């Protein structure tokens, strides 16, 4: 497989499926109480603000074009592992955790 082909297929999968299955609330922190400064954030946030704990395009489920190069590479590596590397093994030989992850990420279809 050529790199350009892997990039094209991974980006298509990400925009069509991958980014929509990311639990965006997982990376949110609901500010409670008084105004305070969060070390992980970009500044001062007021009460009831939802802020992203980790500034990640992947965890925010951004479209492929909005991911930085490093995040695109991570998506390509994961896509390649599940679509190409695991295809060399029989599904019944996958560990239970891998089977669950394949189902959750909709990579087994």
Image (tube, rainbow, N blue to C red):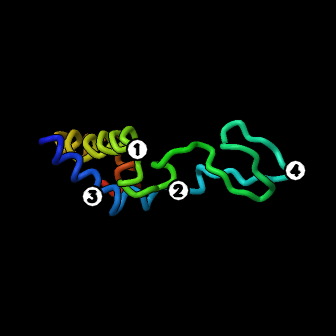
Of labels 1 and 4, earlier in sequence is 4
Which quadrant holds residue 77? top left
The local secondary structure at tag 2 comes to loop
Of labels 3 and 1, earlier in sequence is 3
Of labels 2 and 1, earlier in sequence is 2
The local secondary structure at tag 1 comes to loop
The local secondary structure at tag 3 comes to helix
Relative to 100, 26 lies left or right: right
Which residue is farthest right? Answer: 34
Residue at 82 percent across and 44 percent down: it is: 36
Q: Residues within 10 Å of mark 4 (few under 14, many from 20)?
A: few
Name above or below for residue 23 compared with residue 53: below
Of labels 3 and 2, earlier in sequence is 3
Residue at 41 percent across and 53 percent down: it is: 66
Residue 68 numbered tag:
1
Tell whether label 3 touches label 4 (CB within 8 Å).
Answer: no
Quarter that holds the C terminus? bottom left
Q: Which residue is mark 2?
A: 23
Of labels 2 and 4, earlier in sequence is 2
Q: Which residue is mark 3?
A: 12
Please provide percent x and percent y for residue 6: 20, 46
Relative to 81, 17 lies left or right: right
Tell whether label 1 touches label 2 (CB within 8 Å).
Answer: no
């Amino acid at each position: 497989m050529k790199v350009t082909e892997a990039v094209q297929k991974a980006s298509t999968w990400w925009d069509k499926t991958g980014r929509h299955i990311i639990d965006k609330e997982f990376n949110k922190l609901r500010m409670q109480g008084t105004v305070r400064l969060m070390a992980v954030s970009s500044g001062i946030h007021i009460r009831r603000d939802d802020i992203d704990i980790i500034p990640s395009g992947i965890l925010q489920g951004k479209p492929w074009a909005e991911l930085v190069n490093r995040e695109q590479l991570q998506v390509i590596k994961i896509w390649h592992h599940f679509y190409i590397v695991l295809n060399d093994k029989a599904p019944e030989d996958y560990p239970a955790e891998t089977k669950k992850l394949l189902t959750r990420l909709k990579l087994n279809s």
